[in-house]
Image (cartoon, rainbow, N blue to C red):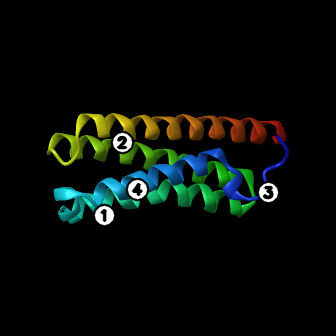
Amino acid sequence: MGKLEKFEDLIAWQKARELTKQIYAITNEGIFSKDFGLRDQIRRASVSVMSNLAEGFERGGRGEFHQFVVIAKGSCAEVRSQLYVALDVGYITQEKFDQIDNLALEVSRIIGGLRASIQKQRNKQS
């Protein structure tokens, strides 16, 4: 693959976008939609994954990009943790949890690979 020209080209961002779409869908349903604290927090965390990938990419430098990728990975873990809360209190089914958690794990793995790649590039420059 050639040089990435825009953040929308990042597979990590594309997958994070899908995760955010699914988070918004489940938080619009039933009693989950009424738990404003958890609903808003899990939404913010999922949006944070996408946003940090985009912002870091646009900053231009590998060091800053790496820092934002690390933050995005942390936000992805936050989404996963909050999914457990939603499952434990009965807002989502085990099946829905498994589906979205698997996507969140995939996003996390992709971000981890991106982080490692950026770090290798940074090490070569040193």
Q: Nearer the viewer, residue 24 or 105?
A: 24
Residue at image coords 68%, 57%: 7
- Element at label 4: helix
* Comes first in the chain, label 1 or label 3: 3
Mark 3 sits on what residue? 5
Q: Amino acid at mark 1?
A: Asp
Residue at image coords 40%, 56%: 45
Mark 1 sits on what residue? 40
Q: How dense is the environment of label 4, judged by Cα within 10 Å: few (below 14), some, or many (20 and up)?
A: many
* Comes first in the chain, label 4 or label 3: 3
Residue at image coords 66%, 53%: 65
Mark 2 sits on what residue? 80
Q: Nearer the viewer, residue 53 or 62?
A: 53
* Comes first in the chain, label 2 or label 4: 4
Residue 99 quadrant: top left
Residue 121: assigned label: none
Mark 4 sits on what residue? 45
Q: How dense is the environment of label 3, judged by Cα within 10 Å: few (below 14), some, or many (20 and up)?
A: few
Q: Is residue 58 above or below residue 79?
A: below
* Comes first in the chain, label 3 or label 2: 3
Q: Is residue 22 above or below residue 124?
A: below
Q: Amino acid at mark 2?
A: Arg
The answer to whether the residue labelled 4 contacts the one labelled 3, judged by CB atoms less than 8 Å apart, is no
